[in-house]
Image: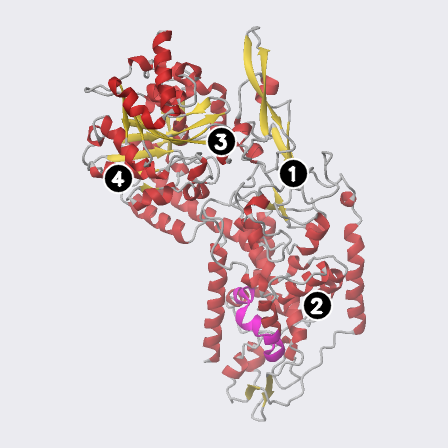
Amino acid sequence: MKRRDFIKAAIAAGVTITFPGNTGIILSPLEAAEKVDLAVSHGVSPAGITKAAIDALGGIKRFISRGDVVVVKPNIGWDRMPEYAATTNPEVVSTVIRLCYEAGAKQVKVFDRSVVDPRRCYKQSGISDAASAVGGVVSFVDDRKFREVKLPGAALKSWPLYAEAMEADKVINLPIAKTHGLSTLTLGMKNWMGIMGGSRGRIHQKMERSLVDVAMFMKPSLVILDAVRILTANGPQGGSLSDVKQLNTVIAGTDQVAVDAYGATLFGLKGADLGYVVAGHKAGLGTMDLAKVKIKRVNI
Amino acid sequence: MTKKIRIATQGLFLLLFLWLFLQTESKGANDLGYPVKIFLDADPLIFITTMLSSREWYQTFYLAIIVIVATVFLGRVFCGWVCPLGTLNNMVGSIKKGRPQKATVDWYRFKYYILIFLLVSSLFSLQLVGIADPISLLIRSFSLAVYPLVSYATSATFDAFYNAHIPFLVNISEFIYSTLKKIFLPFQQPFYLQSAFVGFLFLLILGMNLVERRFWCKYLCPLGGLLGILSRYAFLKRSVSEDCNDCGACAQACQGGAAPDGNEKWKNTECLCCMDCDDLCPRNAVHFGFREKQPVAGMDLGKRRVVGSILTGLIAVPLLRITPIAKAGVADPRLIRPPGSLEEKEFLRKCVKCGECMKVCITNGLQPTLFEAGIEGIWSPVLVPRIGYCEYRCTLCGQVCPTGAIKKLELPEKNKVKIGLAMIDKGRCLPHAHATPCIVCEEVCPTPKKAIWFEQVGVKNREGKERRLKLPKVDLELCIGCGLCEAKCPVLGQPAIYVTSVGESRSRDNQLLLP
């Protein structure tokens, strides 16, 4: 990316944060009529902007076919309520599930390998109730269902991953944007840790390439980054409302690197600041060069 | 007929007990929704000894009062009709082959000596009742041994089916397994220190029924002793009419060893009010009623033995306390008490070792002590972070504690309680000792402003290449000692960050920082 291009993108992103109400008007010239790589939607209704972002990419039917078994993988890692922005917004989760069923999905499964007690995480995050209400099949991770798989292997040669995530017809990654002590930010690729078995604590020694290895293996049909609220400090667990910033934004795309690179801009950073984004870019998983990405912005 | 009603009543109370036991588990919310500790609340022995040892009025006393009043009027109906351990003893006793014979030993006084010992020692602030109280004992045995055992055996069985990969059969077994998980099995397999020890004692108590039915109830149970004394002048009395021909059927059936045949005086304090004797008397000579006037046997505990029990209770108090544990800074540093626990001395005066807190602990981190808290503290709760940490937004242990040894805390209060402090072992920590990045302790630290922070340094690796590293440090002001860092530290075995009790809010002396 040329520096100038980057600054353009960064400014554009900065505008999203500073004047959330106006992005649609200011950035409308950037909108492209044809194929869109990245959709950024903004508005007060989490359900509305989630649908809008998916529609901007061409609608849910582009990703989900009739009869699909779909896995929706939110972040349910912590025992926090939605306001604390430590877990994916439950309304975003339920909207995605509902859309999948509307597209004819046979079954939509929801799970995450929580860091702290799963019962509390599922309940307190509001995700279990919200997902069940729209027919999502919510389950706790079953330790017997991890399978050792070979990975591309720059850092990890193999690792046990959750069978239900690998066996699904389609996987939708549904992370929330937060800060993190080692990787600086936790966005889409970091969310794959929720389907990893074994002793995940060791991953942190080679975090960047490990995440890329798993991301390359998983190949989600769609990544939807929840930035309705973001956690700007003391992540990934948070616990203080003063660290939460309301952005009312959802980012959707198919390029895992581009989504995360865009996610970085929400925090005033750039993709190049995040080790795993750079690693993913270099490994050919996607592009962090936002200037080369067709971004469609929607404001509702 | 009475027998059938009695058995049905016993069954209902046992089912209620088991059902409440199963409900003593989190479902994700911060309350359980059921009064899971009512059997402990209804236990007069816990009620009285806790009041004596703590010299405080008891919180939930009405159920215990009801049992006391019922006993004063009707006799030991609690033993015969309600007590879940008594019912289990009945069930195991029914396996015993052969006709029940008359008791060969005359040990029934022994439970009174145990009772006197417990009452006297509790009067002098030593609370040992939980070791032998039947309700405490039962909940502890179920929590620490029986339920984990059943869970393990069930899961192992279904895992075997699961791993056998036999199509169709797997579907059936998985369906049964998932149903069992919903209604009966624990959310996760519980593991407890001393499972085998506690389980062995429990099996021993059950097994004694094969020597003599209701062996425990007749000879050992201190609650039975207390209720026996309370029933001494009960209004419900038994009489035998002149139709009795000494056939001995009642004496063989008697659950309490109350000498119901006419040969000697009826021991009303030993009668469990099962009324089997009334039921089965072939000549219908036995009657229970409020107007019966036949004389009953005296208690005759023997002055010397009573004095002996009192003295033993007295001696036990200093004997169990002359350990260096009482000196400040000497107590086991790993004696991390659950949040809301009273100061140690007060805590021990109230804890009845029932194991409710260990059962409900969401992470399985609360474990029974052996001698870490002295002999008097045996089976009291200690947090072992390597097994499970204290969940930041959970207050369940304080909610289920029957005596208030662990206070019921509101969430904002709980979030401020320190149960210890974490410290880093720089010799094992990956960034500190091995120039390897790792931030797990900081990542998981649950306080809103993290109690673990990083010092960013540049270090050289073996090749002389500069690496940026984040070295974790603990902010002792913010750390609450929950142990999540220790639980998740990837340095397995001996962790590179661990919690000790120093700094715990409940103690005045066990402190580190200047206030």
Q: Which residue is mark 3?
A: A243
In this rendering, the label closer to the viewer, 3 or 1? 3
Chain of the residue displaying label 2 = B
- The Cα atoms of the two marked residues, 4 and 3, are separated by 30 Å
The mark nearer the N terminus, 1 or 2, is 2
Q: CA distance from mark 4 to mark 1?
A: 46 Å
**Residue at image location 39% in from the left, 28% down from the top:** A191
Mark 3 residue type: Asp
Q: Disc 4, disc 3: CB below 8 Å?
A: no
Name the secondary structure under disc 2.
Answer: helix
> What x and y, as percent, mark residue B445?
55, 32
- Quadrant where the N terminus of chain B is found in the figure: bottom left
Chain letter of the residue carrying label 1 = B
Q: Nearer the viewer, mark 1 or mark 2?
A: 1
The reply to whether residue B110 is visible in this rendering is: yes
**Relative to B101, residue B469 above or below:** above
What's drawn in magenta, residue-wise?
Answer: B69-88
Chain letter, disc 3 residue: A
- Give the crowd class for mark 2: few <14, some 14-19, many >=20 residues within 10 Å: some
Labelled disc at residue B420? 1
Front in this rendered view, residue A148 or A110: A110
Q: Which residue is mark 2?
A: B110
Q: Is residue A254 visible?
A: no
Q: Secondary structure at mark 1?
A: loop
The quadrant in which residue A257 appears is top left
Q: Is residue A244 a member of the stretch shown in magenta?
A: no
Q: Nearer the viewer, mark 2 or mark 3?
A: 3
The numbered dot on residue A98 is: 4
| Of residues A213 and B170, the one drawn nearer to the viewer in this rendering | A213
Q: Is residue B277 left or right of residue A100?
A: right
